[in-house]
Image: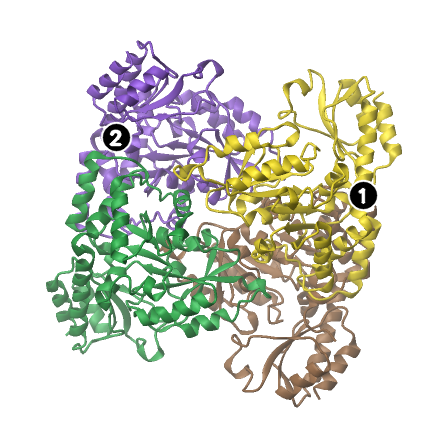
Chain colours: A brown, B yellow, C green, D purple
Amino acid sequence: MIFASDTWSGVSDEVMAAIAREARRGGPAYGSDPLTRAVERRFCEIFERDVAVYLVGSGTAANTLALSTYARPGGMVLCHREAHILVDEAGASELHGNRCLGLDGIAGKVTPETIGAALSKFSPDHVHAGQAVAVSITQLTELGAAYSPAEIAAIAALAHEHGLALHMDGARFAGAVAGLGVSPAEVTWKAGVDVLSFGGTKNGCLAAEAVVFFDPAKGRDLPYARQRLGHGFSKAWFIAAQFDAYLREDLWLNNARLANGAARRMAAAIKMSRIARLALEPDGNEVFVILSKEANERLKGAGVVYGPWSSATFPIGERPRSGELLVRFVTSFQTRASDVDRLTSLLR
Amino acid sequence: MIFASDTWSGVSDEVMAAIAREARRGGPAYGSDPLTRAVERRFCEIFERDVAVYLVGSGTAANTLALSTYARPGGMVLCHREAHILVDEAGASELHGNRCLGLDGIAGKVTPETIGAALSKFSPDHVHAGQAVAVSITQLTELGAAYSPAEIAAIAALAHEHGLALHMDGARFAGAVAGLGVSPAEVTWKAGVDVLSFGGTKNGCLAAEAVVFFDPAKGRDLPYARQRLGHGFSKAWFIAAQFDAYLREDLWLNNARLANGAARRMAAAIKMSRIARLALEPDGNEVFVILSKEANERLKGAGVVYGPWSSATFPIGERPRSGELLVRFVTSFQTRASDVDRLTSLLR
Amino acid sequence: MIFASDTWSGVSDEVMAAIAREARRGGPAYGSDPLTRAVERRFCEIFERDVAVYLVGSGTAANTLALSTYARPGGMVLCHREAHILVDEAGASELHGNRCLGLDGIAGKVTPETIGAALSKFSPDHVHAGQAVAVSITQLTELGAAYSPAEIAAIAALAHEHGLALHMDGARFAGAVAGLGVSPAEVTWKAGVDVLSFGGTKNGCLAAEAVVFFDPAKGRDLPYARQRLGHGFSKAWFIAAQFDAYLREDLWLNNARLANGAARRMAAAIKMSRIARLALEPDGNEVFVILSKEANERLKGAGVVYGPWSSATFPIGERPRSGELLVRFVTSFQTRASDVDRLTSLLR
Amino acid sequence: MIFASDTWSGVSDEVMAAIAREARRGGPAYGSDPLTRAVERRFCEIFERDVAVYLVGSGTAANTLALSTYARPGGMVLCHREAHILVDEAGASELHGNRCLGLDGIAGKVTPETIGAALSKFSPDHVHAGQAVAVSITQLTELGAAYSPAEIAAIAALAHEHGLALHMDGARFAGAVAGLGVSPAEVTWKAGVDVLSFGGTKNGCLAAEAVVFFDPAKGRDLPYARQRLGHGFSKAWFIAAQFDAYLREDLWLNNARLANGAARRMAAAIKMSRIARLALEPDGNEVFVILSKEANERLKGAGVVYGPWSSATFPIGERPRSGELLVRFVTSFQTRASDVDRLTSLLR
């Protein structure tokens, strides 16, 4: 039983079929193919407006390129202190002229309060500190929580008031949309998001992510930056093909619903456990659990694969006590109910 | 009939089958899977020695990461003035701390003479000019020519004497090995190459390139640099799967032989033409041809797809005369003899 | 009365005289002059060993160049969370390939404990986090404290054990040496420091800082990096002239003793105050004081110039209480005892 | 007799007096002092319009910061192939996101023709090549020639038509203004220059250069970029003091007239020589001369200091013949007529 990460999942059959279809014939290189154009139109439909879309092969590429658009000298991107762009991309943001400033926050969320406090450190009269250029939020957060449209709108209002862009790292965007039951537009541009890293890889694709600018003019330099990053693939249709299948007939949302459902099933069962307890109520496909020593040993003994998680940003009251361990279980569209049930039966 | 570029070709069935096989099951992320280990061992076999191998998704990524290893402040990479790293990667090398210095040379080749002349401009007493850190050669060159082992050895000797690394951009490495009839070892480390960008994408893969260090210790920082570039893919097994098939039972060399054979067939026929002439004898799968106006019109009229090429680096005597046009035809493992014959019949 | 910063001080007469002397005649450009050679020898004397010395015009240049030597992809420099390189250089470190990771610590100091905890986050098996490349300590710290040779040696031992370099930002190095009563060698290479930013500007120079490598071979690339940063000045003798005077007949230590003495005099008097209290015992020329509202108003009314300071990194018990304010008074070699006495009389 | 470079000259007495005056008292740090404000106003007077001025310590810093303002991903700055920014700054431009593309041209000048030809290589449909972002011209050129206002206007028109900025590297700007007999406005913004690196160091200052934006809004990010480069000096008044004296009572133009006059005197005499001949008619303070072997030996024997120069960009007819040597003599405001006469008498 693998609950290590949704990056360990396989690929949806529809997605592989689409790649295979294109791979037989090849075609115009570097994204000049008709399928890429069709996928761009599909993104406009999904977001109910004109958007500029740039396909890349990894979430790190999507995030760093999205944010490079807003880079200025000494530029700072305000994000949660556990944000992927800050702690898990080996400095990709810095490669493109930005630094990340990590803020505290419950469940991986930043708020107008923490952002406002950080902004008070920046001033044109004190260039030593640099200048804030963007706020980046992760949807779902690194702790599996979903920002509501209202939460996003409050952050966006503050960001825009200070001339900052609002970026959303949507590596698990599908899970958020499915979990919140809102439209893609409602949790993005209608709430004030300027640019989105739209993830496919964690939810049924092979290697497919998209940078989506809600003001298409902002994407002007992206093709150059993408080429420079080595993400201007010659056979770029292999990414378009993935999105073609992923966005067709709601495969992306259906996959996310499967993953979320498995997580909810797991969380509900864990609430009944005497040797494990939920650390956070899951909004998507990540379940953070505090295991007793006994529980951990049982799971390891049964060959369950999962990982420890840092509790440093959890509220004091929700951290593991002595002998306990905070861990993360991640579900995916491939997770079987029977595997969830086996896991939770071990925790009874 | 498409002779635009080998980047327009499709993917070998064996390669797609390997991706599909892995995609059904997924597995450990970020290259920690057993297939990646197996591919690394396969590279050691092919090169008849221990090598350090890092898989990436594009040639630009491979080149810039390979060269980043040798970057120093003010560092200069000496290469041909038509080298891909200089003119076709939108400044990727510069992103990693190097600049490229373009040298003249017939058929896309640099020589000990041109390198030596360039090196005379650098000195620790004149830091303004920067410092040479590496020589980069392209195999096949951008003009489709193959460096012989002896040519490479002469360049390597000079480079090493001056403390420079020798990088080989092997986007069409298979074509060179197949064309020269030498072993992979003979045209690389045995001749003095330090690091190779080993290409798969132009010759039957989907998106698969490898950085190969012949001194494994030199690869120490590559995983960090790769992650930072967004080429540390979560489902990295999709690249390993491609190489697994590509390097199995000589698929890579067989594909190259098909492409080279088609180019030779084309070149032989063009030598008979009255309205077109060979600009260069092809060593691999690229045929540079000078077309008369009439020839160009006939081909365009017949829907043949190909592109113009700059003649600036050709010897004066081999440049197009007034009314003529220099063009490039590229073959691939998928090129059919019948298509070649149709093309050349149009040029009779 | 100006206690805003030692950067507001003027220049020692001896230093100005040396610049003027050289300025009359000019001479070989870009540091190829005999005075630069003489200053390099003087540094060797002062540090009792062969060192490689590179003159630059600002502390930010010195720090970022010193650290650029140890940059690797995804490289992290561990420093205090108030370190100048992290919060006051507008991202200069990032420009050269490093990121800074801020650690907690009393009085601006990092310790083997905080460094060790941070290092546990890095591993070649988790390249996402990057890799630690150096520890940087500030001497005097940003809170005016001096690291003892024993404290430095403990940090160096841990750093070296993990393959990290130890950098010392010595913007106020003279103050530390004078205050500790040790030799320059004892607080640097004898304790394990690998590279020092040796400051002159805050203590009697105009614009003179030096990067000092205790292993001269490490400086190999510095001249290139310096030129690229625009700190390879054509009339570089203007920096050499400053150091020539500054390091002659212990001007540098005498200036520091004057500044430190003024700070001690101030601190002693403040201990007697009913409306102000010392936040930290000063080791050098910076006095951190918690002012009552009344005290603050009196000083402002009297035209004293000084600045507020963040108390975020102070131990809870030493932070200002409601209505109080944490401020910093900085003395310099030009501070007059009468000004100190006027200040403290206002605080009685 | 030193004719090596104007960077070998000393400093005008007025300039040193101004530094010494400020150095006695010190004052507000980082450019927040009243003298910096006064210098900014003086620049507005000199250029007869509102300008944004940023003081730095070296020409490399001025150039790279000026151009960083226009950097975009894959950005290319078109300049002469001997331009200082391309060949003498160790890659400083690349550090800030630009690459330099060197163009041919007589006497160090680019023209609308060479720029137009280069621009034809760039297109949004071919992002591999990057994108042109600016044209940079050097005034005086690296070969001592002055662009006339009409020449600049023609270049500016083409640049602006393509959305490129026009930068002028004015390391020897005073010499050009003095030589052309035009106003500073006429050779800059009135002709279409967007940003100027205004040099002082080669003409009587110690280390003083200014970035001047003719559209003040373009300077918004300069202070951040300058701090990051380590050119936000704490005692920044030392640069303001230099400009205060340099721009007062036309010292800058008078110094330039002295240097230019010495060059003209030298050139006139060399025209009479049998063993040396002018390679180019000087517009400013640089005299390029082709020496016979005999002439070179005489000068060396007499201890004259000067340097060889590359003839690669000279028209074929003006290159040294076998046995001859192309050299550069540079005069300055300190050059004495008697030294010029001694030199030319050696060449009779």
User: Considering only vertical position in the picture, is C227 above or below A297?
Assistant: above
Residue visible at 53% across and 24% down in the picture: D114
Q: Which label sits on residue B255?
A: 1
Q: CA distance from mark 1 to mark 2?
A: 69 Å
Question: Badge 1 local density, few (<14 within 10 Å), some, or many (20+)?
Answer: many
| Quarter holding residue B231 | bottom right
Q: Which label sits on residue C224?
A: none
- Residue D124 position, x and y percent, is 62, 37
Callout in the foreground (1, 2): 1
Q: Is residue D209 left or right of residue D163?
A: left
- Residue D232 position, x and y percent, is 34, 49
- Residue D118 position, x and y percent, is 56, 28
Q: For mark 1, give the secondary structure.
A: helix
User: Considering only vertical position in the picture, is D273 above or below A10?
Assistant: above
Residue behind mark 2: D252
Question: Badge 2 local density, few (<14 within 10 Å), some, or many (20+)?
Answer: many
> In front: D289, or B218?
B218
Q: Are marks 1 and 2 in contact (CB under 8 Å)?
A: no
Chain designation of label 1: B
| Quarter holding residue A92 | bottom right
Q: For mark 2, give the secondary structure.
A: helix
Question: Can residue B301 be seen in the rendering of this structure?
Answer: no
Q: Quadrant of the N terminus of chain C?
A: bottom left
Tag 1: amino acid = Asn
Question: Can residue B335 be seen in the rendering of this structure?
Answer: yes
- Residue C19 position, x and y percent, is 20, 43
Tag 2: amino acid = Trp
Q: Is residue B22 left or right of residue A170?
A: right
> In front: D15, or A52?
D15
